[in-house]
Image (spheres, grey):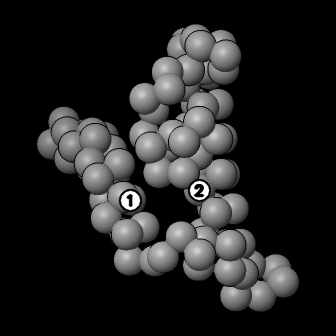
Amino acid sequence: MAPSERHSKIIAYGQAYELLSAALKQFPREMWQYKPGPERWSIHEIMVRLADSEANSYIRCGGSSPSRVPRSWPMTRIGGPNH
């Protein structure tokens, strides 16, 4: 990967919370449980899976145990279990 591509990916990753928060504001909280079909995921289910993936990646990359994950993690600010 070229340094410029790596840099743009790091910048995009750093903006993910703001982009996701802005996107979620388009939908009322009541709509987060809606499933467009039996085999489709709701907004809430997608968010739970994203949070789980982030927590697992954090631990896999040398972070703390799950019990030590800071309450200030972005997922807790947008409706996660610690909200």
- For the C terminus, the quadrant is top right
- According to the picture, the residue beneath numbered tag 1 turns out to be 20
Along the viewing direction, whichever of 41 and 29 lies nearer the viewer? 29
**Snapshot quadrant of residue 3:** top left
**Which of the labelled discs sits on residue 71, or is there none?**
none
> Residue flagged by tag 2: what amino acid is it?
Met
Q: Which comes before the other along the chain, label 2 or label 1?
A: 1
Residue at horizontal 42 percent and vertical 67 percent from the top: 24
User: Badge 2: few (under 14), some or many (20 or more) residues near its Cα, within 10 Å?
Assistant: some
**Snapshot quadrant of residue 34:** bottom right
Q: Residue 13: horizontal and vertical position, in percent?
A: 33, 44
Along the viewing direction, whichever of 41 and 67 lies nearer the viewer? 67
Viewed as shown, does residue 56 lie left or right of 63?
right
Q: From the viewer's perspective, is residue 1 above or below residue 33?
A: above
Say which element carries label 1. Answer: helix
Q: Quick one: which residue is furthest to the left in this view? A: 4
Q: From the viewer's perspective, is residue 50 above or below residue 1?
A: below
Q: From the viewer's perspective, is residue 5 above or below residue 64?
A: below
Say which element carries label 2. Answer: helix
**Which of the labelled discs sits on residue 47, or is there none?**
2
Observer able to see residue 11: yes
Residue at horizontal 31 percent and vertical 64 percent from the top: 22
Along the viewing direction, whichever of 4 and 45 lies nearer the viewer? 45
Q: From the viewer's perspective, is residue 15 above or below residue 24?
A: above
Observer able to see residue 9: no
Residue at horizontal 64 percent and vertical 63 percent from the top: 44
Mark-to-mark CA distance, 2 and 1: 10 Å
Residue at horizontal 82 percent and vertical 80 percent from the top: 39
Q: Residue 78: horizontal and vertical position, in percent?
A: 47, 51
- For the N terminus, the quadrant is top left
